[in-house]
Image (spheres, rainbow, N blue to C red):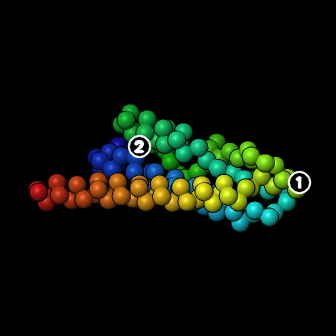
Amino acid sequence: MEPFDKALGVHPFSMQLRLNRAEIIASNLANVDTPGFKARDVNYAEVMRDVASGISAGTKPRFDGVDAATQMMYRIPNQASADGNTVELNVEQANFAANSMDFQTSLTFLNMKINGLHKAIKGE
């Protein structure tokens, strides 16, 4: 594993996963009125646990974004609709907003890491 990758930790992976998750939720929102559409999501905590364990083991984790076959799952609706669509507008909007805030948090942590590396290189 590259020293630079180790210094940045999970933050680049977290940002990529948050970006992928935003696309998934946006797709759910775009299909809110599509009969039979099944809302999808990814278990962020599970994916990041795998990434973190790979980093702590000293290997670069294999992460190419969200793998639909293994990491995506269907969302179980609180109230099923008559047409079989499982997208709940208020739930998806709340998830999108929370994911956006988490993306900003990850970006802040990554910026702090990069600033720390910059200062270390400059000898400050």
Task: Identify the image quadrant of residue 85.
Answer: bottom right
The answer to whether residue 112 is above or below residue 10 is: below
Q: Name the quarter where the C terminus is drawn.
A: bottom left
Depth check: give the residue in front, 102 or 90. 90
Q: Which residue is mark 1?
A: 82
Q: Is residue 86 left or right of residue 41?
A: right
* Secondary structure state at the residue bearing disc 2: loop
Image coordinates of residue 97 in percent, x first then y, are 55, 60
- Give the residue drawn at x 43%, y 35%: 53
Q: Is residue 29 left or right of residue 81?
A: left
Depth check: give the residue in front, 100 or 121. 100
| Marks 1 & 2, CB-CB < 8 Å contact | no
Image coordinates of residue 21 in percent, x first then y, are 58, 55
Q: Which residue is mark 2?
A: 60
The nearer-to-camera label among 1 and 2 is 1
Q: Can the viewer see residue 16 in this picture?
A: no
- Give the residue drawn at x 88%, y 54%: 82
Tag 2: residue type?
A: Lys
Count neighbours of disc 2 (C-alpha within 10 A) and say few if under 14, some if 14 to 19, many if 20 or more. Answer: some
Q: Can the viewer see residue 109 in this picture?
A: yes
Q: Earlier in the sequence, mark 1 or mark 2?
A: 2
* Secondary structure state at the residue bearing disc 1: loop
Depth check: give the residue in front, 39 or 67. 39
Which mark is drawn over residue 114? none
Q: CA distance from mark 1 to mark 2?
A: 46 Å
Count neighbours of disc 1 (C-alpha within 10 A) and say few if under 14, some if 14 to 19, many if 20 or more. Answer: few
Farthest-out residue, left: 123
- Give the residue drawn at x 54%, y 45%: 44
Depth check: give the residue in front, 3 or 51. 51
Q: Is residue 37 left or right of residue 29?
A: right
